Amino acid sequence: MNTEKFNPTIIIIFGAGGDLTWRKLVPALYNLWRDEWLTRQFSIIGVDRREMKQNEYRQHLREGVDQFSRQTVTNEAKWTKFANHVSYIDADFSDAETYTKLAEAIESQAKEWDAKPSTIYYLAIPPSLIQMVTEGLGKAGLAQDRERARIVVEKPFGRDLDSARALNQLLTSVFDEKQVYRIDHYLGKETVQNLLAFRFANALFEPLWNRHYIEQVQIVVCEEVGVEHRGGYYDHAGALRDMIQNHLMQLLCLVAMEPPVSFDAEEIRDKKLDLLRSIRPLKPDEISEFAVRGQYEGYQSEPDVAPNSYTETFAELMLFVDNWRWQSVPFSLVTGKKLAQKSSIVNVRFRPVPHLAFPKSATESWEPNELHIHIQPDEGIDICMQAKVPGLKLRIEPVAMQFRYSEAFDKEPVPEAYETLLLDIIKGDTTLFMSAAQVEQAWRVVMPILEVWEKSKRGIKTYAPGTMGPKVSNLIPVEPMLMAS
Ligand code: BG6
């Protein structure tokens, strides 16, 4: 039973008939409700173009919950109770009348509750519709309550720096920046949040967390799946836009940012922004040395992908952070689709000991210390160190000390990323959301690479599905580090 109480809340989902709502948002809201996080005074209003009766819409959502939620519907009465909080409006986003109707629905709910509710406008819609809906909300006066009205925007935040700036300008012309929640679902993952606890709630690591002790850092997000049914979107995005500019850059921030003074949202966001600002921009003539791209064999035959496409499905960057803590430490950011395994991991390799006093024969298998932070699957942390192999012969070999979430905290079900993020939006906590400045700065980092890659297909390497991507000789090899874990 959760005792924390939140303001009465109305969640208005634009794109209520879409995949995101069906697979992620409503299952997450259902779980929050089941776990008693939501107050009795909450309602969900779905808005979309398709004509649907209330019952039809609720039934559609139920199927999504049954398929995708970590807690499925086991009790009919409970589902009905939840479903009573949900309503559906079929409406045209371009029609001013839609927003008037919405304002009336909010007003009447507020009267019924006798309270001023928080209103969350969740844009689960394609980027091309964001302007229309944001302006519609603005004109109807629905953004005016600076404390209680919030807008939620999903990635992609633009497709380059200019379009991201334009999007931010649009959003902040109607809402205040503090009302805008830019979602990066990686920030809702338990292990990603644990990076902050790991770094700043332990005395052990922070003294070593710098260029004097760390030799290199790799942030790797491998996927086994290909582009599946998203070829139309992905072929215009590619791995750099789809993953590196947002998810991997956010992971980099959490791994490398300076310790915050407090866990205040602004403080964390500022520290992350400082880190992004310290990333050394790559010059056009350095790109071939520090950035690698690849495409899996068969990608060009995927549905909605251009037959001669040179969109990258694999990207690997080596970045340097120009500050006192990290000068000269390479940070590799690696991601790809159709790789050998699904695995998101942060690997930190420490510098070798200054002197190995053991006989050479004892240290043939010696390796530097490594820390593996497994973000998914098999969430946990390994500290890889050296130990003497028991026996009369002196032999030193690597061993791993392992912590696994599933073993350490098996009683607590791990919430889905969207549960964490939706609850934070309801609470009005922006810590796990990206500020306009962060998004733009992350674009600044990738722009030089995008520009070079868009001009020519030179240097793009193909790789066989089920491998670890193209063979790259000039970057730190991913494979040995991953396999070691
Ligand atoms: C999304 C990307 O943001 O993240 C997808 O658009 C990618 O291409 C997905 O597959 C990966 O998320 P997760 O949570 O499965 O690692």
Image (cartoon, rainbow, N blue to C red):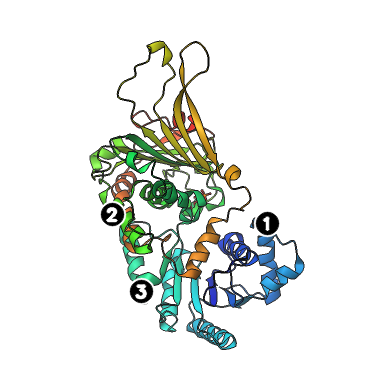
Establish if 148 lies above or below 422.
below
Q: Nearer the viewer, residue 186 or 236?
A: 186
1 vs 3, front mark: 3
Q: On the image, which quarter does residue 88 sit in?
A: bottom right
User: Label 1, on which residue?
Assistant: 67
2 vs 3, front mark: 2
User: Label 2, on which residue?
Assistant: 274
Q: Residue furthest right?
A: 76
SS class of the residue under badge 2?
helix
**Which mark is first along the chain, 3 or 1?**
1
Residue at 69% over, 59% down: 72
What amino acid does circle 1 point to? Gln
Q: Residue 32: where, in percent of width, then height?
A: 60, 64
SS class of the residue under badge 1?
helix
What amino acid does circle 2 point to? Asp
Q: Residue 277: where, in percent of width, then height?
A: 27, 52
**Which mark is first along the chain, 1 or 2?**
1
Establish if 182 lies above or below 337.
below
User: Label 3, on which residue?
Assistant: 176
Q: Residue 248: where, in percent of width, then height?
A: 41, 48
Q: Is residue 220 visible?
A: yes
2 vs 1, front mark: 2
Establish if 329 lies above or below 149.
above
Q: Nearer the viewer, residue 10 or 33?
A: 33
Q: What is the C-alpha distance between the residues marked 1 and 3?
A: 37 Å
Establish if 196 lies above or below 5.
above
Number of numbered markers: 3
Q: On the image, which quarter does residue 13 sit in?
A: bottom right
